[in-house]
Amino acid sequence: MVIFLYILEKNSVKLFLWRALRDYLPTKVRLHERDIDIPSICAWYKKEMENLWHTFMNYTENQKCWRHVSLDILINYLSVQALGFKDLCFSMLKSCDSKMREMFTMVLWSLWKNKNNTLWNNETMNHTQILSRARKVLVDWQLAKGLNKELPLSVVHNKIHISIF
């Protein structure tokens, strides 16, 4: 499990990824398995089980996110061979360079944040906003750690342009 330790030092994102890869995130399926009395069916689609695969890959806005950062083709290719979400993640992390791993991880994290904000605060973001948050957190972390010596033009103007991704 060493591979994800090199993705980011941002502890909240590392903890998220660790929990996701161990299937510890509280999806409806996982909560149901722990004898919490809730239906394991997705509240939005009403026909699929809400597991990690469904949460990160099946929603329309999530698919737009993967398409917008040009990871959709690789995800689709690797998902044919993947045995599940964990297997897909490890395949993605092994087959991508460091920038792509960071992007993949930050988009996953931002998608999870969006799911929780929708569920608990009734605040839903579109794919542009989800990706903007992912990029902002990544750039802020890089600047704080001194990893990004050049300020991207979008940060100088206090805007995040998705085209940077």
Image (spheres, rainbow, N blue to C red):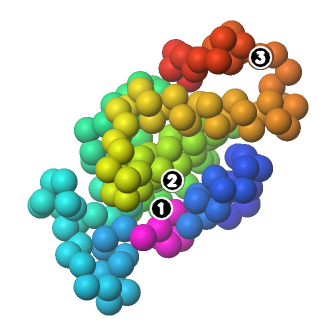
Mark 2 nearby-residue class (10 Å; few <14, some 14–19, many ≥20): many
Q: Are marks 1 and 2 in contact (CB under 8 Å)?
A: yes
Choose top left, top right, bottom left or bottom right for residue 45: bottom left
Q: Position of residue 42 (x, y in %)?
A: 21, 61
Which type of secondary structure does the marked residue at label 3 adopt?
loop
Distance between mark 1 and mark 2 Cα atoms: 5 Å
Q: Position of residue 99 (x, y in %)?
A: 66, 32
The residue under label 1 is which amino acid type?
Lys
Choose top left, top right, bottom left or bottom right for residue 50: bottom left
| Residue indicated by mark 2 | 89
Choose top left, top right, bottom left or bottom right for residue 54: bottom left
Closer to the camera, 144 or 98? 144
Question: Residue at point 61% right, 47% down?
Answer: 94
Which type of secondary structure does the marked residue at label 2 adopt?
helix
Q: Above or below — where is 119 with respect to 125?
A: below
Q: With 145 as the anchor, is 80 left or right in this view?
A: left
Q: Position of residue 135 (x, y in %)?
A: 59, 31
Range of residues picked out in magenta? 20-26
Name of the residue lying farthest toward the bottom: 35
Name of the residue lying farthest toward the front: 121
| Residue indicated by mark 3 | 151
